[in-house]
Every structure is written in C-alpha cells, then in structure tokens.
Image (cartoon, rainbow, N blue to C red):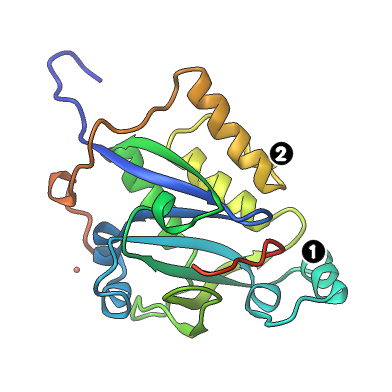
C-alpha cells in the first residue's frame, strides 16, 4: 500500500472441510454479479459454498472402490457443486471444520475470479446446470478442466487461496487436512485474521461482466 492510500475494505470468506473434501464459501452477492444464473437459482442465499471435483465421483449416489480409483487414475470431466447458505458456514455446517479468512477487496476479487474459472461456460457465458446437488439447497454445474491425481478438489481450493494471497503451495496439497493446516499456520504466524465486522459488496470495485449428513469421501 502506497503512502496516503486508503485501506481496502475487508471481506470475510470461509474454507470448509467435510473430512475428505474442501469447499470455498463467499458472500452470494458478488459471485452472483459475475454469474447471474446463481442469483436466479439461489435468490435468497446469503453465502454460497463452492466445491470442484470429479464429475462421476462427485455426482454418484453410491461410491464404489472402482469409481474412486477411476477418478484418481484417469483424467475425467469435472463438475462444480454450489450450495446456498442462509447463514454463515460455521452456523450451517454443524460438525464440519470451518476456517474464516479476512481478505482485502483486491484479493477477494482474485478469489472470485478463481471460483468463476471453475465453471465451464459457453459462448454466451452461461453456466450449465447438471442436476441437484448432494446436500441442502444445492446444484451441480459443468466444470472447467479435468480431474486427476495431481488436480484434485483440495488442490483447486488451495489454488484459490493462493490466488487470494495465502502462503500455500497447491503442488503439495492432496488432503483436506493439508488445506486446513495451511490456514491455521497462516493464522498462527499472523498472516491472516478474522474481519472486524462484515462489509458489504457496495464497497468493492465494480467487476460485473457487459445440512444434512455429508459424505466425507467426496
């Protein structure tokens, strides 16, 4: 920050671990400006949780060893999972580990960019719904990129955190525990903190473009 510059407004985001899989939770308003279909699908959401993963494994109603091995060993299509939250994730995801992060507006919008890039969009920039999600008020969408051993759901989360300025190396991230430990380490070193109080989207630069039980194996 240059001398005399005003501090960037603080934005609170969250990382959630459901055991095996991690997700990114952001206020619904900014991401819905970038992807208006989310506003249509989740009109009353205060927050939205996003998770990226293997299409066949993530959307399966029954998980088998063969399906798990296939998703890891063979590059496969990806999917985005979006969940509407009526409150903060620490109040919604009872039993899941939730870590808050306070980002300035620049890093926050970089995180939004990362989430948006996880969706596959057509020439009309619209995202493609692919059925109901696996818990709560949720929806699957066609994802961008292939899932494989070296490009997993937790690496996707880590890449978003790195884009947002967190000192984390996605290359070494495979498990949810590694993602959450990196956040905890950053907190311990004073590199991150909770926001003093939530700020709203009106303070951000304009970036518009012209539970139930959780399956811990996902």
- The residue at the far bottom in this view is 131
Q: Residues within 10 Å of mark 1 (few under 14, many from 20)?
A: some
Residue 92 vs 179, above or below: the answer is below
Q: Secondary structure at mark 2?
A: helix
Q: Which residue lies under the disc numbered 2? A: 172
> Rounded to the nearest whole Å, what is the CA distance between mark 2 and mark 1?
16 Å
Q: Which residue lies under the disc numbered 1? A: 72
Foreground residue among 143 and 95: 95
Residue 105 vs 167, above or below: the answer is below
- The residue at the far top in this view is 3
Residue 184, horizontal then vertical, whole percent:
55, 30
Q: Quadrant of residue 125?
A: bottom left
Residue at 68% x, 82% y: name it. Answer: 61
Q: Is residue 28 left or right of residue 188?
A: left
Q: Residues within 10 Å of mark 2 (few under 14, many from 20)?
A: few
- In the rendered view of the protein, which quadrant contains the C terminus? bottom right
Residue at 57% x, 44% y: name it. Answer: 158
Q: Is residue 90 left or right of residue 106?
A: right
Residue at 69% x, 78% y: name it. Answer: 56
Residue 1, horizontal then vertical, whole percent:
25, 20
Foreground residue among 28 and 151: 28
Q: Is residue 68 left or right of residue 196?
A: right
Residue at 28% x, 61% y: name it. Answer: 46
């Amino acid at each position: 920050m240059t001398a005399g510059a005003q501090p960037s407004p603080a934005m609170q985001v969250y990382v959630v671990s459901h055991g095996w899989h991690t997700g990114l939770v952001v206020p619904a308003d900014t991401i819905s400006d970038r992807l208006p279909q989310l506003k249509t699908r989740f009109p009353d959401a205060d927050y939205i949780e996003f998770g990226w993963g293997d299409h066949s494994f993530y959307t399966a109603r029954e998980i088998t060893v063969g399906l798990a091995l296939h998703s890891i060993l063979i590059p496969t299509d990806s999917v985005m999972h979006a969940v509407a939250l009526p409150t903060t994730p620490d109040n919604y995801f009872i039993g899941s580990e939730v870590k808050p992060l306070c980002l300035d507006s620049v890093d926050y919008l970089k995180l939004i960019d990362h989430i948006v890039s996880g969706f596959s969009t057509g020439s009309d920039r619209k995202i493609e719904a692919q059925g109901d999600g696996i818990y709560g008020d949720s929806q699957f969408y066609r994802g961008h990129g292939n899932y494989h051993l070296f490009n997993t759901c937790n690496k996707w989360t880590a890449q978003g955190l790195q884009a947002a300025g967190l000192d984390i190396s996605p290359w070494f991230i495979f498990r949810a525990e590694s993602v959450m430990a990196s956040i905890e380490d950053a907190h311990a070193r004073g590199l991150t903190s909770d926001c003093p109080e939530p700020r709203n989207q009106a303070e951000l630069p304009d970036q518009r473009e012209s539970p139930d039980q959780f399956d811990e194996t996902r």
